[in-house]
Amino acid sequence: MIAVGNFTGFGFRLAIYMLASLLAGMCLREYVRSRAAVSVGDPTPRLWGRVSWDPRTWFDPFGSGVLPGLIAILWCAQLLLIPAAYGKPAPIDPNRFRRPVRDTIVVSLAGPIATLLLGVAAGLAFRATGLPVEARLFLLTLCYTSMSLTVFHLLPIPGLDGARMLALALPPDARRVYVDFDKYLPLLVLVILFLLSSLALGVLTAISGGLCSAATGSDCSLF
């Protein structure tokens, strides 16, 4: 195995598999979320061309480019920070929902449920016998990355799905202030994942690893 410092060929392969898994997970997530909004009465995502599998419709320079790239560099050195990415928010008008509170929850949960199911599917495929080692490594990475996306987007960080649901429980004035913080999403993500990495890794990795272990039947904490 070729190694330069902490960077190894194995780490590079892991990083490539992680980035491919993030792309697959984000395409699925953004498509399902936009489709869910249309299904509960808001045609805005369809009118803006967001009900699509094309990554260009949701690509965000920082959330879909810089952030995964920074994490991939760490993975090359086998420092496995939780995979995370986010796209441009789909143009959604809650005023068009048939039942605003219920439908906001439905749309907010659509993406995390989609990536959770993708992780479960990858975990079940990982359990199959006779697969090449490299295929099993990719499936394990896909499972872990999908579970990490699920957990990440349920965090109560303004701009993510968890915050949209939490905002429903806040008084109107507090809700407006809380939701307006979504403009600082890149800064908040950097602080949580990097500056507070020890705390974030302890909680987020434990949850993501537990979901991955349950899906694959293997101890993903070793991953």
Image: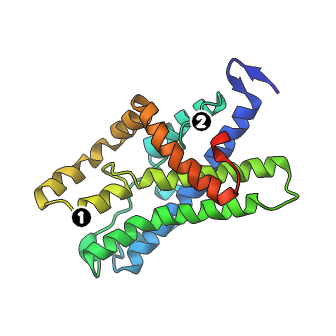
Q: Amino acid at mark 1?
A: Leu
Dot 1 crowding, Cα within 10 Å, few <14, some 14–19, many 20+? some
For the point 67% across and 40% down, which residue is it?
A: 222
What residue type is disc 2 on? Leu
The reply to whether residue 61 is in sight is: no
User: If you read the primary sequence from the N terminus, does the residue marked by circle 1 or circle 2 appear first?
Assistant: 2
Question: Which residue does the image show at 38% across and 51% down from the upper left?
Answer: 155
Residue at the extreme top: 5
Q: Which residue sits furthest left? A: 173
- Residue 209 sits above or below residue 4 on the image: below
Q: CA distance from mark 1 to mark 2?
A: 34 Å
Residue labelled with disc 2: 80
Crowd tier of the residue under label 2, counting other residues whose Cα lies within 10 Å: few below 14, some 14–19, many 20 or above: some
Find residue 83 and report its horizontal and vertical position in percent: 54, 44
Q: Nearer the viewer, residue 129 or 71?
A: 129
Identify the residue at image location x=67%, y=21%: 6
Q: Is residue 136 above or below residue 48?
A: above
* Quadrant of image for the C terminus: top right
Quadrant where the image shows the N terminus: top right
- Quadrant of the rendered structure where residue 214 is? bottom right
Give the residue number, with chain letter if any, for mark 1.
Answer: 168
Q: In the displayed structure, does residue 2 sit left or right of residue 34? A: right
Residue at (24, 53) in percent of width and height: 179
**Label 1: element kind:** loop
Residue 150, percent from left and from top? 49, 56
Q: Position of residue 201 (x, y in %)?
A: 49, 37
